[in-house]
Amino acid sequence: MDVAHHLPPQSDYKVQHELGGARFIVSAEGCRITDGEGVTMLDGMAGLWCVNIGYGRKELAEAAYDQMLELPFYNTFFKTATPPPVRLAAKIAEKMAIGNPDLTHVFFNNSGSEANDTIFRLVRYYWDLKGESKRKIFISRKNAYHGSTVASASLGGMTFMHEQGGLPIPGVEHVDQPYQFGEGFDETPEAFATRVANTIEERILAVGPENVAAFIGEPVQGAGGVIIPPNTYWPQVEAICRKYGILLVCDEVICGFGRLGHWFGHQYFGIKPDLITMAKGMSSGYLPISAVGVSRHIVDLMVEKGGEFAHGFTYSGHPTCAAVALANIEILESEGLVGRTKTVTGPYFANALKRLSDHPLVGEVRSLGLIGAIEIVSRKGTNQRFGGAEGTAGPIVRDLCIEGGLMVRAIRDSIVMCPPLTISEAEIDELVSIIEKALNAADPLLRSLDVVAEEAMT
């Protein structure tokens, strides 16, 4: 039935048919998932960067059940509202206000892609209201991921996505990403951060400051490969935005709701964006919901000028999804998972990963909170890749990890991890042990592939 009727996202359908279908995940509990063959694995990816409170939480199922019995759905169009999204908006505003009391309002959507699509329209609408309609250009980063709609994929900087459908659409510029291991290997973190941040200012000047609407970026790039910028990068980016009066947008779809040991990732870096997007950990993936956090000065202008913001979705502020998201946040609060990530499991995760630093295949380990990556290299002390090109080693090590009982993801030649915030120290040790065994098993195979590649070149 899978290959006969189901088209999964982000897939090579020829490969899907050759495989005879996908691996079925049929149940989960805590930090573990079980497939249709009865094989249980540690979920090192929290589903898809999202199951922050772990699987099997009856509180969320009960919240959905109770809300469905009371009011399963009603829209928020036409001057109507329902209690759950209003309560959720107030709770999110409380968390956004930590370090940035100007973030006061919330606009609901269904996915991270839709949230960033909303950003695209809201930012341009804001500048129209201010009488600066020439400000249409967004500046983003190469290799960024902001979603799969036409607008959000354009905001993203992944060329393989742009090659389909004639993207990006006009009005989006892409500058260098803060990927020091890959693109600033011999530089100091401070020098690299300044150089890469300056590419934003250079692009602003090239297209004209009067034409630029906003800069958008993830505090830590997730799908780009868990790219953690030097600590001096984001303050410089914020200063550049303020210098030229453009809006600063933080995509918090992955970093939000405790992933970096703070409610939102921008709070770790000490910056104050004008808008933020959020999804994933907002409901721990139990139901689809996303949001845009909006600063008071933007809302004040819309209130002052009046007129309809002609944008929204049937399920914006869906009451059942909002009730589940609110219950999810209450668990994050009551179990202290955000603080635990900052002071306990995040540091433990970092120290556990460091045990792999001396492995001959490992060029770098990096993490922040409970998100991390391991760079695989062919020659220790360099960023040289097997076969002379990226993408050979990562999938091999990933598959060995999965065979060993750990679900992780390969992005080029990085093994990336994003486990549930409920993960224990013992499970972190298990995660690192499985990766180490996979690296050991991959070493001779990768060396042989490198020899073949070198012989082919000569």
Image (spheres, rainbow, N blue to C red):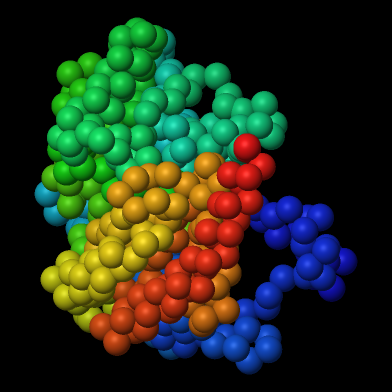
Spot occupied by residue 298 in the image (x, y as percentages of width and height): 28, 32
Compared across the picture, whether 2 is left or right of 215 comes to: right
Q: Is 93 rendered above or below residue 281?
A: above
Instruction: Give the residue displayed 28% in from the left and 63% down from the top.
Output: 357
Q: Is 5 rendered above or below residue 221?
A: below
Instruction: Give the residue displayed 48% in from the left and 77% down from the top.
Output: 406
Q: Nearer the viewer, residue 220 or 448?
A: 448
Q: Nearer the viewer, residue 226 or 388?
A: 388
Compared across the picture, whether 110 is left or right of 458 comes to: left
Quarter assignment of residue 296: top left
Residue 295 in view here? no
Q: Is 261 rendered above or below residue 238?
A: below
Which quarter of the rendering shows the N terminus? bottom right
Spot occupied by residue 63 in the image (x, y as percentages of width and height): 43, 80
Quarter assignment of residue 422: bottom left
Which quarter of the rendering shows the C terminus? top right
Spot occupied by residue 206 in the image (x, y as percentages of width and height): 36, 8
Instruction: Give the residue displayed 40% in from the left and 32% down from the top.
Output: 141
Give the farthest residue toward the right: 4
